[in-house]
Amino acid sequence: MKSVRVAFAADHAGFELKNELTGVVKRLGHEVADLGAHKYDAEDDYPDFSALAAKAVVTGEADRAVLICGSGVGASIAANKVKGIRAGLCHDTYSAHQGVEHDDMNVIVLGSRIIGSALAEDLVKAFLGAKFSGEARHIRRLEKVKGLDAR
């Protein structure tokens, strides 16, 4: 597997899982940028961390990002507000790799209150190990999705 630059970010609900997963990803040989939270704060807000990770991807500081909040829903909504981000909430390995292969997903979002650390590890491995297919039908659909940014 080619080394990938991965930005990680999580609010208080995803804080512990983020810390576990950054270690896993480093052991796989990938470069990790931990964008926070750097300490547990029950009053922090997922949009702040979603924006940091999304901006790291669109500026090229990271190839992909992993976002974690309680359900994953809020972080996914927030990340998708950033032009150029294709964030998918994934709680199964098929979606984690298929989202990259078919939709060029560049951010995976996990719900720490929905899944455990073993499944989260499998999801991140599937996400990082996948490549966009480049098939004509997937390119056509991706261009349509990108066109929605201009609206």
Image: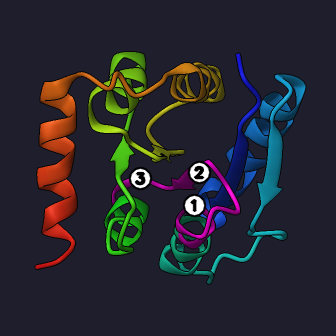
Looking at the picture, how far across and down is residue 66, in whole percent? 58, 48
- Is label 1 in a helix, a strand or a loop? helix
Query: What colour scheme does the image use?
Result: rainbow
Which residue position holds label 1?
57
Residues at discs 2 and 1 in contact (Cβ within 8 Å): yes
Q: Quadrant of residue 83?
A: bottom left
**Identity, as a three-letter code, of the amino acid under mark 2:** Ala
Q: Name the residue carrying label 3.
A: 72
How many marks do you count on the picture?
Answer: 3
Q: Quadrant of the N terminus?
A: top right
User: Spatial distance from mark 1 to mark 3, Cα to Cα?
Assistant: 18 Å
> What amino acid does circle 1 point to?
Val
Residue of label 2: 65
Q: Is residue 96 above or below residue 4?
A: above
| Category of crowding for the residue at label 2, using alpha-carbon neighbours closer than 10 angstroms: few (below 14), some (14–19), many (at least 20) | many
Q: Does the stretch in magenta take in 57?
A: yes
| Mark 1 surroundings: few (<14), some (14-19) or many (≥20) residues within 10 A | many
What segment carries the magenta color?
55-73
Where is residue 17? Give x, y as percent.
69, 44
- Mark 1 or mark 3: which comes first in sequence? 1
- Callout 3: SS: loop
